[in-house]
Amino acid sequence: MEAARIIGVFAQTDQVVRAMQEKYHPTEIETAAQHHWESTGAHRAAEDAGKPKYYCLSMFPYPSGKLHMGHVRNYTIGDVLARYHRMKGYNVLQPMGWDAFGLPAENAAIQNSVPPAQWTYDNIAYMKKQLQSLGFALDWERELATCKPDYYKWNQWLFLRMLEKGIAYKKTQVVNWDPVDQTVLANEQVIEGRGWRTGAVVEKREIPGYYLGITQYADELLSALDTLPGWPERVKLMQANWIGKSFGVRFAFPYELDGKKDLLWVFTTRADTIMGVTFCAVAAEHPLATHAARDNAALAAFIDECRHGSVMEADMATMEKKGMPTGIFVEHPLTGEKVEVWVGNYVLMSYGEGAVMAVPAHDERDFSFARQYGLPIRQVIAVEGEDFSLDGWREWYGDKNRGYCVNSGKYDGLSYDAAVDAIVADLKDKDLGDKQVQWRLRDWGISRQRYWGCPIPIIHCETCGSVPVPDDRLPVVLPEDCVPDGSGNPLNKREDFLACTCPKCGKPARRETDTMDTFVDSSWYYARYCTTAATRAANDKMVDAGTAYWMPVDQYIGGIEHAILHLLYSRFWTKVMRDVGLIKYDEPFANLLTQGMVLNHIFSRRTDKGGIEYFAPEEVELIRDAGGQITGATSKSDGDAVDYGGIGTMSKSKRNGVDPQALIEEYGADTARFFMMFASPPEQTLEWSDSGVEGAYRFLRRVWAFGYAVREAAAAKPAMPASLPAPLSDVRRELHLTLKQANYDLGKMQFNTVASAAMKMRNALEKAPKDAAGWDAVVAEGLAILLRLLAPITPHICHTLWSELGYAGDIFAASWPEPLDAALAQDEIELVLQVNGKLRGSLRVAAAAAKADIETAALANEAAQKYMEGKPAKKIVVVPGRLVNIVV
RNA sequence: GCCGGGAUGGCGGAAUCGGUAGACGCAGCGGACUCAAAAUCCGCCGCCGCAAGGUGUGAGGGUUCGAGUCCCUCUCCCGGCACCA
């Protein structure tokens, strides 16, 4: 192999620099560098108490078939951080694995009649090659796939611990059931009452399933967000909203129905307005609504309508508030007054009690509802200087921080807190209510009627019921040769899987065929990577001392789409593992970086039939005006106009994706990596640009060409002279100044400006006058800085140039470059000269010049005098090292 | 509707504490090399203006010697969501 020859030749003596290739051949040097890292075990991580540890983790991929640009971006960011920290002296762990269970494998199986396991393993093999070709510094010895029994055994094991602790439990709940796919759908997957994939009318079914009591940890999950300064604020806010803690009062309206006494429970955060209740509203699914609908056809029809309505909030905010009376009356708990119960489409069965008290005067929804149906509105809160009127809603009606009770009998004059306390005391006396904290978060249903997932370790026995599988019979292994055909879970047909004996009584029994939600798999993989080789081999522990050493993750990198579910479940799982005594840390991810998405241009055209036809960017020709602005596009195949649809996320359906494989093959991994880092800061969206990729490639070619051109000067290892001629010391100073800035930017993870700093350095080096004394020393030093700065971003070219140019050792073992004071120092500095805040010139002064001397020099300056127009200076502002501003 | 984040050249994006706005790159224009093209190299490149100069960071106002950066009001764009009682 060509590449091996270059490296082989190089390893010997100084003379071989002549054998260095003149041109940049990315494929050759990348293959060689990757072989070098592989054969030297460069990326293996081992526990080392002598160094600070740095655990750098990117969210593991689903093995969908091939990498997409989002993966490339994610893993490049992680790799830059990992390699940078390694050069900074950290003991770095960067592992990789596969989130290998899930629905796409089953769909592929249905289409191609291949078992999901085989499809998944094939994809893993291909994608692993792709990851390797990108040169990521990954410790592949720690690779894991969640579909392997040695991994999911511990899902099952911890699930059993949760059962013991009462965190996991079984319950029957109404779910959205897709009769075609034979599975449960999440609310998000039900669109206008139909399954998102099949279009079948979704049924409400009561089916049993296993739930994890994440609500038991709601308080800690919320309060511990404050212990995560390294997380983006918006992610913490999204989690806080999702957990949704609210303080209020739960109380009941007594009623009698069919001769039976009962209570209608409601939750409110405005107990102070309880005297203003004029009706109650219940959700369509509420038992009272069901009861009333029994002999009320119109109400039954209305309830049916409510059930089919959207559950998405965006629709609901604009939705018309509708309702219908049930004819049922309940009793006000404090006044004994009769209060009518309505069914309201704005009341949610899933929150609180599925019923609300309605205070139209002080709740905006109740207000509009009451006005629409002519229900009474009773003001019970007043604000000084404001008039209450029924003409329309005003902001202050619902503001609990202003005002006091009126028309409320004994509570009159009380403010919010006092009124709530007094009212709760009275409710408590009657045993009809108390203060309560209400959470939006609900327990995590993990049962899926799916084949390709982790089996739930339960055995159903006719005499003993649901019996947990004993620890010593774990893992419950999923057969890997099933081929789903779309007619439900194939496990139900697998007698060899189903048949078992009851662990309690020994009689023949049946295995549970539901599998776990794949979010379970991804809730703790980061802890498993950390285990020692011994534990991985014996598989006798879930986590071990390696976990204690590496965890928590120092930097986690992934998409914002996981801001809530994956990150919340992982935090929950961590706390359970801690409470089971497996680990000591409270939070899994110390720092979180949510990378932006990769976007590209979208081109489309209306078809004759009225549909939309998308064009890949390479299929169109852009039309630009004289200034270079894009004004339109035409199809390359038929020459007709194509609509330019702006930019959007890369997606298959819009045909605007770019295949990383083609990119790597054409330009090499370093170009792909450099472009990804340079085009925008990691948290922002990244716009794809073919010419931007060209630019990245051009830059790397120039770096190589420069290295080639100065190979002899660099190899001679010249000493830096005590003093340099001005043009050279300027170049050297610029290099060190740029380095100083780049180091600062690295600390902020602002890699785009680090990449531009590398470009600036090369530009500066190119400008250095070759005939000046000390040129070789400046170039040799500068190149050593440039290569190390660039190495985390483009490791292959930097590794190769570093050794080809004869720098000592391996570049990734070299120390991180730091700017030298001697190089930064200068005798004279240039100050900006302003008159009245406007730029009027510049001023050269001695670096050590005193303020008074600077002022004198500024006043004597020709440009300054011109713009002062003979007026005396009122004031002179001197900003040391920066500017002088003369105010006249 | 609510919450969060934004708005800087033709484009992606720089500008650490309020101190030369537009770094770096892309696109564009001009030139060198070439039979030619590509590649490469050199130069120009916010807007108005021949120039001097003026003007300019979504809009309007304010604070300041000085504002992209701080304060107030507004517009638009993106992301998230729960009619949450």
Image: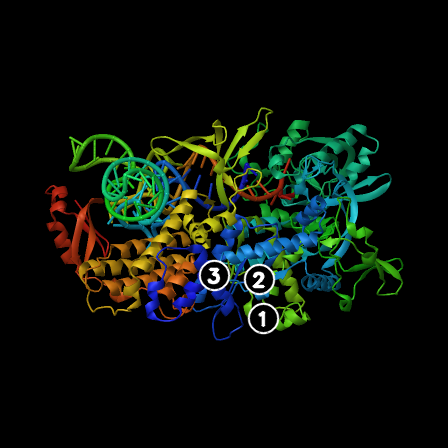
Task: Give the residue number, with chain letter if any, for mark 2.
Answer: A587
Asked which quadrant contains residue B75, the reply is top left
Asked which quadrant contains residue A758, the reply is bottom left
Structural crowding at the residue carrying mark 3, measured as other residues with C-alpha within 10 Å and reported as few (<14), some (14–19) or many (≥20): few
Relative height, residue B61 to residue A667 (above, below):
above
Residue A815 horizontal/vertical position (percent): 38, 68
Mark 3 to mark 1 CA distance (whole Å): 39 Å
Q: Mark 2 vs mark 1: which is more N-terminal?
A: 1
> Can residue A594 be seen at all in this image of the molecule?
no
Residue A298 horizontal/vertical position (percent): 78, 28
Task: Give the residue number, with chain letter if any, for mark 1.
Answer: A546
User: What subunit carries mark 2?
Assistant: A
Could you tell me the amino acid type at mark 1? Answer: Gly
Dot 3 and dot 1 residues touching (CB under 8 Å)? no
Structural crowding at the residue carrying mark 2, measured as other residues with C-alpha within 10 Å and reported as few (<14), some (14–19) or many (≥20): many
Could you tell me the amino acid type at mark 3? Answer: Met
Q: Secondary structure at mark 1?
A: helix
Residue A183 horizontal/vertical position (percent): 74, 45
Asked which quadrant contains residue A851, the reply is bottom left
**Picture disc at residue A1:** 3
Q: Quadrant of the C terminus of chain A?
A: top left
Relative height, residue A115 to residue A341 (above, below):
below
Q: Secondary structure at mark 3?
A: loop
Viewer-nearest of labels 2 and 1?
1
Query: Residue at point 74% right, 55% down?
Result: A481
**Of the pair A154 and A598, the residue shown nearer to us:** A598
Residue A731 horizontal/vertical position (percent): 25, 58
